[in-house]
C-alpha cells in the first residue's frame, strides 16, 4: 500500500505567516490529474489556486474550508497514481426558492467578504471629508497629455503621487497596528483599488514616492492589468499603510471606504463636479472639485495627524506643479 503524502500550507510571499483554505475543489477519495486544482488558498485578499504536482487521489482532508493555519501546516494527505483523468466537477448548492437564484461566491469574493467583515468589526474607523479644487491640476494635466510624450496621465495617477509624497512627509501615517503596538513601515507603498469581474482587488505600488510620474503611471498600468487578468503575484499584494480607491467613474460624490486589513487608512475619491464658489469679491465662480473621504484606524491616527495628512494631499493637488516636475 502506498504511503500517503502531505499537502502543506504553502508560503506564497516573504511576509506570509498563515493562509486560509478557501476551497477544496476535490472531495476525499477523488482522483485528479497532474495540474488539477486541488486547493485554493487565500493570502492578503488574493485567492491562489494550487495545482497538483502529479496525478493521484485525495486521501484525507485535515483542515476544513474557511480555517486559517500557519505556513507549513499539514492540510491533507494524498497518494500518487499514474494515468488519472480528472472527473467532471459538480458543485452542490442548497435548493433555491422560485424570489431567487443561489450562486456560490468565487474565491476572490469570499476572501473580500471575510477580510472586509473582519476590518469593519475589529478596526475603529473614523472619517474625514473635504473638497479639492482641481482647476490648475486639470489644466496642467491637459497640457502634458496634449504633448503626446510618455504615458497618458490620469487623475488617479496624480492622486496616488500626491498621497505618496504626503505619506513620506507624515511618517505617522506610514505605520499599522499589530499585536498591541505599531509597525513602522520602511518605504512608501500605496495600494490601488481595482474593480475586476472577479471582485475588488488592491495591488500595491512599491516605492511610490520615489518614482517619476511616468514610472508611476507605467507601473500602475501593469498592476491593474495583472489584477484584471487574475495574474497578481505575491509581491503585488500586501504591505503599505494606505490604499487609494477612486470611484469617480461611477458618478458618486462621496465614498467612505472600509480599510483593508493590515493597513491603517484608505482614501475614497468621488467624481469631479462643476460647482459655483464665491470669489474674493463674493461673485460666483465656476470651479471643478472632487470630494474625498479619508477612512482612518483610530488606534494608529488621531484626528489632528490625519487632518494634517489630508490637508497636505489637498494642498499638493491644488498647487500641483511639483507633481508634474517629478
Image (tube, grey):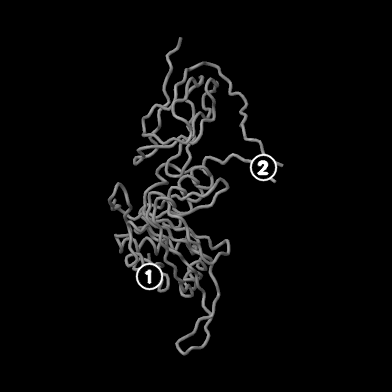
Image x and y of residue 184, in percent: 28, 53
319 to 110, vertically: above or below? below
How dense is the environment of label 2, judged by Cα within 10 Å: few (below 14), some, or many (20 and up)?
A: few
186 to 7, vertically: above or below? below
Residue projecting furthest to the right: 98
Image x and y of residue 181, in percent: 27, 51
**Helix, strand, or loop for circle 2?**
loop
Image x and y of residue 261, in percent: 41, 49
**Helix, strand, or loop for circle 1?**
helix
Q: Is residue 13 left or right of residue 273?
A: left
How dense is the environment of label 1, judged by Cα within 10 Å: few (below 14), some, or many (20 and up)?
A: some
288 to 113, vertically: above or below? below
| Residue at x 50% of width, y 67% of height | 147
Residue projecting furthest to the top: 1
| Label whose residue precedes the other's in the sequence (2 or 1) | 2
User: Label for residue 101?
Assistant: 2
Image x and y of residue 72, in percent: 36, 30
| Residue at x 48% of width, y 72% of height | 134
Quadrant, the C terminus: bottom left
Q: Is residue 193 left or right of residue 265?
A: right
Residue under label 1, please give it. Answer: 311
| Residue at x 49% of width, y 84% of height | 278
Quarter-of-image position of residue 97? top right
Amino acid at each position: 500500500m502506498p504511503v500517503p503524502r502531505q499537502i502543506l500550507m504553502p508560503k506564497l510571499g516573504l511576509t506570509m505567516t498563515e493562509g486560509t483554505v478557501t476551497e477544496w475543489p476535490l472531495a476525499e477519495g477523488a482522483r485528479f490529474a497532474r495540474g488539477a486544482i486541488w486547493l485554493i488558498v487565500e493570502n492578503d485578499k488574493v485567492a491562489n489556486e494550487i495545482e497538483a504536482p502529479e496525478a493521484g487521489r485525495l486521501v484525507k482532508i485535515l483542515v476544513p474550508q474557511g480555517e486559517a493555519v500557519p505556513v507549513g501546516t499539514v492540510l491533507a494527505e494524498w497518494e500518487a497514481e499514474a494515468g488519472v483523468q480528472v472527473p467532471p466537477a459538480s458543485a452542490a448548492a442548497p435548493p433555491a426558492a422560485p424570489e431567487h437564484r443561489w450562486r456560490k461566491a468565487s474565491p476572490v469574493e469570499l476572501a473580500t467578504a471575510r477580510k472586509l467583515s473582519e476590518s469593519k468589526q475589529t478596526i475603529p474607523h473614523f472619517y474625514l471629508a473635504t473638497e479639492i479644487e482641481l482647476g490648475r491640476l486639470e489644466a496642467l494635466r491637459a497640457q502634458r497629455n496634449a504633448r503626446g510624450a510618455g504615458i497618458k496621465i490620469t487623475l488617479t495617477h496624480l492622486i496616488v503621487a500626491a498621497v505618496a509624497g504626503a505619506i513620506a512627509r507624515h511618517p505617522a501615517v506610514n505605520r499599522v497596528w499589530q499585536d498591541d503596538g505599531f509597525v513602522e513601515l520602511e518605504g512608501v507603498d500605496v495600494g490601488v483599488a481595482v474593480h475586476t469581474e472577479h471582485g475588488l482587488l488592491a495591488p500595491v505600488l512599491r516605492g511610490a514616492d520615489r518614482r517619476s510620474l511616468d514610472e508611476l503611471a507605467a507601473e500602475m498600468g501593469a498592476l491593474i492589468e495583472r489584477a484584471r487578468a487574475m495574474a497578481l503575484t505575491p509581491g503585488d499584494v500586501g504591505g503599505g499603510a494606505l490604499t487609494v480607491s477612486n470611484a469617480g467613474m461611477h458618478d458618486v460624490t462621496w465614498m467612505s471606504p472600509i480599510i483593508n486589513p493590515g493597513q491603517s487608512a484608505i482614501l475614497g475619491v468621488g467624481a469631479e463636479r462643476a460647482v459655483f464658489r464665491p470669489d474674493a469679491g463674493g461673485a460666483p465662480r465656476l470651479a471643478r472639485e472632487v470630494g474625498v473621504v479619508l477612512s482612518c484606524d483610530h488606534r494608529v491616527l488621531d484626528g489632528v495627524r490625519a487632518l494634517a495628512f489630508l490637508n497636505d494631499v489637498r494642498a499638493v493637488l491644488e498647487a500641483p506643479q511639483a507633481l508634474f516636475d517629478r
